[in-house]
Amino acid sequence: MTEQRTPPPDGRRGVARRGSTVGRSAKPVTAGAAAAEAGTTATDTSDGRPDPRPDDAPRVRRRITVAEVLADVPDDAVIVARRLTKQYGDFTAVDRLDLTIHRGEVFGLLGPNGAGKTTTVLMLLGLTEPTKGIVRVVGLDPQREPLAVKRVVGYLPDNVGFYPGLTGRENLRYTAKLNGIARTEAEARINELLREVRLEDAADKKSETYSRGMRQRLGIADALVKSPTVLILDEPTIAIDPAGVEELLALLRRLVKERDLTVLLSSHILGQVQSLCDRVGFFSAGKLIAAGPLAELAGGTTAVMEFEVAIEGAPSSIDAVVLGVPGVTAVAPDVHEERLRIVTATSDVAAPLAAALAGAGLTLTHLRRRGTDLLELYRKYVPEGIDGRAR
């Protein structure tokens, strides 16, 4: 999504008008409205006893409230979606999404282009209305309190837009003014952010002269001007060269640690998600297929594990050594790569394998546990040949 900025007439900056919902609690939700919002149906009598009425008599139905739908939400939840659905006519872009993102974590929403990731982000921000379901961001309802949500959430769209005729510093000043930040405070904050994103030297150059990587770094500074507690990044490294990608990811790692941010990173690029995220969710055709830490998605510590092992010299020298390592149950040549041996074990034996091979005078050149690579997990959870259909 491209963020459009329309400059005010005569070149002067305007001040954002505050909506009537700012600073007020959400509208009261009736039982019927709650069930409609949650996309739930009513239930029958809840005491567990058989209904004594005739089969053709109407059943007493009880509406499921928002509080009941959110009853399982932990105290540290920052972003919550329950049964979240977005339909365009007969087409379902997001299908009954259940998602919880905890305070201080980096969550990667991973899926192909068109899987529904951006649609999900727009619903979290209150920029598009869900067909069904419930969304809460820092306890706020984006549909009823969109401006309040925007005050605590920094957003970097996949193609951030700035006024091209203004400098980087001037664009940040505009954002600060829109968010009601006093001039003195804004200047100090802007100077700090320009240092953090390494744009001090380019701060007073027009943003139209910036490279794509520089615009993305300015976009991160722009998202952080209001000191948000949540940062949502939609394809933040798309169309950036490899050096720029690594620089941007290093910046994000540092900012997350220093500012204690909660981050939702939407991407289809596997490597950046694996290097940055605490947990990942696999998204395909509007559905969240699986979510969790990589180790958990790989099968956890109780699963049978496989390790790729290679040494300098004859691969067969590996066999006798590794079979003596506790927990190793088998060793066999890799069917695709002659230099590799595949070691099967009942626990994580990576360190003992390395020590045993070194003790036998063998030089280890490759050791990797199979199944923890994000590409492998992606292929496991997202059916081959499925492309997402709605962005």
Image: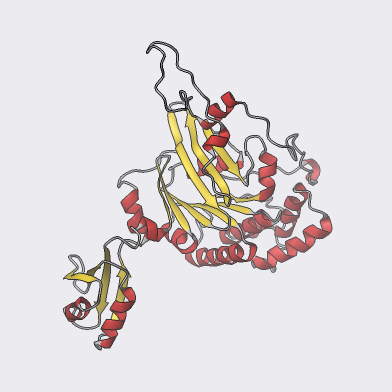
**At x 80% / y 43%, what residue is drawn?**
10
Q: Is residue 202 visible?
A: no
Q: Position of residue 199 (x, y in %)?
A: 66, 66
360 left or right, relative to 68: left
Q: Is residue 176 visible?
A: yes
Viewer-proximal residue among 10 and 294: 294
**At x 20% / y 65%, what residue is drawn?**
336
**At x 46% / y 23%, what residue is drawn?**
44
Q: Position of residue 39 (x, y in %)?
A: 50, 29
Number of numbered discs: 0
The image quarter containing residue 212 is bottom right
28 left or right, relative to 337: right
Q: Position of residue 187 (x, y in %)?
A: 79, 61
Quarter of the image that includes the N terminus = top right
The image quarter containing residue 9 is top right
In the picture shown, does residue 271 fall above or below 140? below
Q: Position of residue 329 (x, y in %)?
A: 20, 69
In the picture shown, does residue 208 fall above or below 386? below
Colouring chosen for the image of the structure: secondary structure
Viewer-proximal residue among 173 and 143: 143
Viewer-proximal residue among 134 and 68: 68
The image quarter containing residue 145 is top right
Viewer-proximal residue among 127 and 81: 81
In the picture shown, does residue 126 fall above or below 108? above
223 left or right, relative to 313: right
